[in-house]
């Protein structure tokens, strides 16, 4: 397996299991919801990445902010690391307990606390998943927009500053946040903001904890913005002669102000994987999955505008779907693309890249990357949220083949340099975790990363909140 | 005049003018762009608020990030406060040099550095005003959306997390930011982010400096998002029998998903002030100023939807304007509302409130506040960005009448409590400055404000960046 944590800082505790006093205390607090079972710990020290797990010493399953606070205070008193765990869908090793400690599994914090359609807001416990929230919203006429593909926990989506397929229209997780309840490193509980749609009342703590990956505290409650369900939605699939034409179509549509609800590009290899996995018969060519929404008239108008742009770029005919079950049939394979791709090569793991560049540079960045993939001999489907300038390569490797792993890591390394050269970022939506840490200084500059380090020190002076992630102290 | 700075922390320097070494150094660095002229200092120690000026000891007029950095490093070495100055349109005393020091006037940092329509971004020096940027964008087909009324500097708009009339459609200044160049307290220069549309690469420093009101560093360059100019824009004015009906109309439209471009409510007194100031003949009743944009068909459709909602709430006929000069004639009086209202009472100053609440509570919050104004006997026009839940009362006082000033302060105080009781904020868009500081703990809680304080200490350990504002150390 791929070693994943050579370079981390020294641990804050002994890494030989928890102090007996803490074990007793957590046992008393959580009863059967505290475990040191090797199997449970192993499951909580792994994620969707290609890298070797690093299990925590114990796992707790809190049900409330108060329980998180009590357990955090206890871990703080003992100098023991804490790693929050949502559903385990990270691809950047956020969950690996590289310095041991306690994993806080939020799956029992699954209560939708408050839905306020009249304010377009909902407040949930951090462990609520996006699909659960949208089920509970179904009858209200409103929905929660952020859709990273995986049925992630909303707390996890905040912690990694996730986004996904409809960011182009509705924004990222950061854009859809109003307020957080956070348990600080020492167990104190704060609420970052009130529920007004905007505020200038002091430093924006909501946005500091969003994307902090558990390194500054644990998010226990999230208030999100809701959006009215559009009157009409239409989905369309359209093929292109090459990836560049597909990308340019979306960029031009955005520059024209077409409010695309979704605009996903999948390369021919991804379509091949989807056909094999979902038993579809999509044409194995670079493809756009598009979604339009609004009033019936708006959807029609957007579709007509897009058709003109698609034709200019040599795209084919639209395959349309408007009824919910048809749209679902069209989009479900896209949502399964990640798992479909991994099954292109049974037994493989994916080293997943996440470059994001200014949209005018996206076609060039993908073209250079595709050439690099071809030269490398790696099997690597490419797809992306092209309206955001963000794309993923799934570098499918045999985790036991060191040469292949090295080749994938080198390719990923070159892609990050390329993205930064284009004034982009090493990670558009997956987060830093362990493996993007080496790039932060190149991307932001030494002094900028030092400011991040100062904030980390100010909020977690003992370096025991997901230590070894995002920034080294 | 109203005293404004009794409660601030002790100064970091002597407050008896600048140290001679610093005076010499700034003189060498800036030549004639450094001054200790009493008149210039007085002008830079005042703003649009009702409170007494507090002039700095000197003013510099830097032209570049490098000059700001050199001067900041010098002030840091001498422990001298620094206060950034944009155009002086603050209403919350951000600019008052309550501990003396040097005002950094950014008006010569007025270069539009880079317009990239292909990426929907523009990069400007902090002193560029929003009108200047939009003039330079006029031929590109894109525009910068944030419009706080005043022709503020973009750096100032970032520093106060400003918003304004089209936030309901395009978001606040925070929502329209991609990246900042910031000179830290000690003179180090950082760039907070690259130019991709989204990123998860570490802590969100862009959003920490946005809204930090000069207390963490000086913003010298700003990269903003641009929006395509819509094909069609229509403006409309419509009267209502009461303020509540006007507010409810907008809230219902938002809940229905109508993408209003602007939705401003002005009460009858504000309309009276506008008529007097702009020689218009608007009906002196609660009024909505609305703007619709999109394709011609969309604008028509939105207008028809709104007409239905307006009728349900007892509103009158629409007065429409579609051609640019007509729209300008309709909207210009709204943009001059602030100054028109002040002239309702010659010689008065305005104590301007800025409550913002969840939208379903807005009608109640305004109703209670209007009753409170009537009971107080103060002259106070009310208008607001009702789609955001944000409204302003201009409490017009004779600054030399202590009883009146006290009555206005008490009314403002009650309004803040009311907004917080409705889960809202003491400031939707004006910022904390000096006068909202006492409310932050009530709004956010003691532990939350302590986190802000820890961030302030981490980034400005000597407390010399706009000291005495936002949080006390």
Image (cartoon, coloured by chain):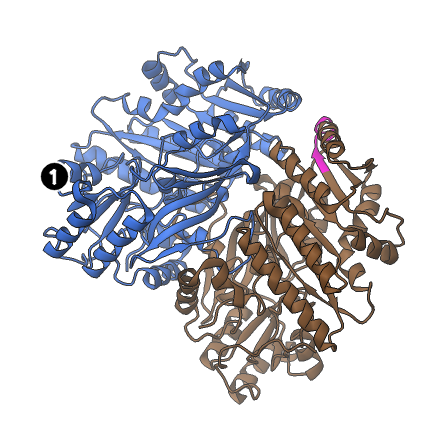
Chain colours: A brown, B blue
- The chain that hosts pointer 1 is B
In the depicted view, which residue is nearer to us: B110 or A414?
A: A414
Measured as percent of width and height from the top left, residue B363 is found at 48, 33
Residue B131: name its quadrant.
Answer: top left
Q: Is residue A68 magenta?
A: no
Range of magenta residues: A292-299
Q: Is residue B143 visible?
A: yes
In the depicted view, which residue is nearer to us: A124 or B161?
A: B161
A366 over B224 or under it: above or below:
below
Q: Is residue B430 visible?
A: no
In the depicted view, which residue is nearer to us: A387 or B289?
A: A387
A56 horizontally vs A277: left or right: left
Q: Which residue is mark 1?
A: B38
Residue under the point 18% across and 39% down: B52
Residue under the point 72% across and 61% down: A375
Measured as percent of width and height from the top left, residue A85 is found at 62, 68
Measured as percent of width and height from the top left, residue A140 is found at 68, 42
Element type at mark 1: helix
Residue A256: name its quadrant.
Answer: top right
């Amino acid at each position: 397996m791929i070693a994943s944590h050579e370079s981390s800082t020294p641990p804050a505790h002994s890494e030989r299991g928890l102090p007996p006093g803490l074990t007793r205390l957590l046992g008393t607090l959580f009863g059967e919801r505290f475990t040191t079972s090797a199997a449970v710990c192993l499951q909580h020290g792994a994620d969707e990445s290609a890298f070797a797990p690093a299990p925590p010493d114990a796992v707790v399953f809190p049900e409330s902010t108060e329980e998180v606070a009590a357990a955090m205070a206890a871990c703080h008193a003992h100098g023991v690391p804490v790693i929050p765990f949502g559903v385990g869908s990270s691809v950047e090793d956020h969950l690996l307990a590289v310095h041991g400690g306690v994993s806080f599994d939020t799956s029992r914090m699954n209560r939708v606390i408050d839905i306020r359609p009249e304010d377009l807001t909902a407040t949930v416990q951090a462990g609520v998943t996006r699909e659960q929230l949208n089920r509970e919203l179904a009858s209200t006429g409103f929905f929660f927009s952020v859709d990273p593909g995986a049925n992630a926990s909303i707390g996890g989506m905040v912690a990694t500053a996730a986004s996904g397929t409809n960011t182009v229209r509705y924004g990222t997780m950061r854009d859809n946040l109003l307020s957080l309840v956070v348990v600080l490193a020492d167990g104190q509980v704060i609420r970052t903001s009130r529920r007004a749609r905007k505020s200038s009342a002091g430093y924006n703590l909501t946005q500091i904890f969003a994307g902090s990956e558990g390194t500054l505290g644990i998010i226990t409650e999230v208030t999100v913005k809701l959006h009215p369900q559009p009157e009409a939605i239409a989905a369309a699939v359209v093929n292109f002669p090459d990836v560049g034409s597909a990308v340019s179509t979306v960029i031009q549509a955005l520059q024209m102000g077409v409010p695309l609800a979704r605009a996903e590009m999948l390369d021919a290899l991804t379509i091949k994987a989807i056909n094999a996995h979902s038993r579809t018969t999509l044409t194995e060519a670079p493809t756009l999955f598009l979604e339009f929404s609004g009033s019936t008239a708006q959807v029609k108008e957007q579709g007509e505008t897009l058709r003109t742009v698609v034709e200019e770029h040599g795209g084919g005919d639209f395959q349309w779907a408007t009824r919910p079950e048809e749209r679902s049939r069209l989009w479900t394979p896209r949502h399964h693309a990640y798992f479909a791709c991994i099954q292109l090569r049974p037994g493989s793991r994916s080293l997943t890249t996440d470059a994001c560049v200014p949209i005018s540079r996206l076609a060039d960045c993908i073209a250079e990357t595709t050439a690099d993939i071809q030269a490398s001999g790696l099997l690597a489907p490419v797809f992306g949220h092209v309206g955001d300038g963000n794309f993923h390569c799934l570098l499918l490797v045999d985790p036991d083949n060191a040469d292949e792993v090295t080749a994938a890591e080198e390719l990923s390394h070159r892609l990050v340099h390329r993205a930064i050269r284009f004034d982009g970022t090493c990670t558009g939506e997956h987060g830093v975790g362990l493996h993007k840490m080496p790039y932060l200084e190149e991307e932001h500059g030494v002094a900028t990363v030092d400011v991040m380090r100062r904030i980390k020190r100010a909020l977690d002076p003992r370096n025991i909140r997901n230590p070894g992630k995002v920034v080294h102290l």
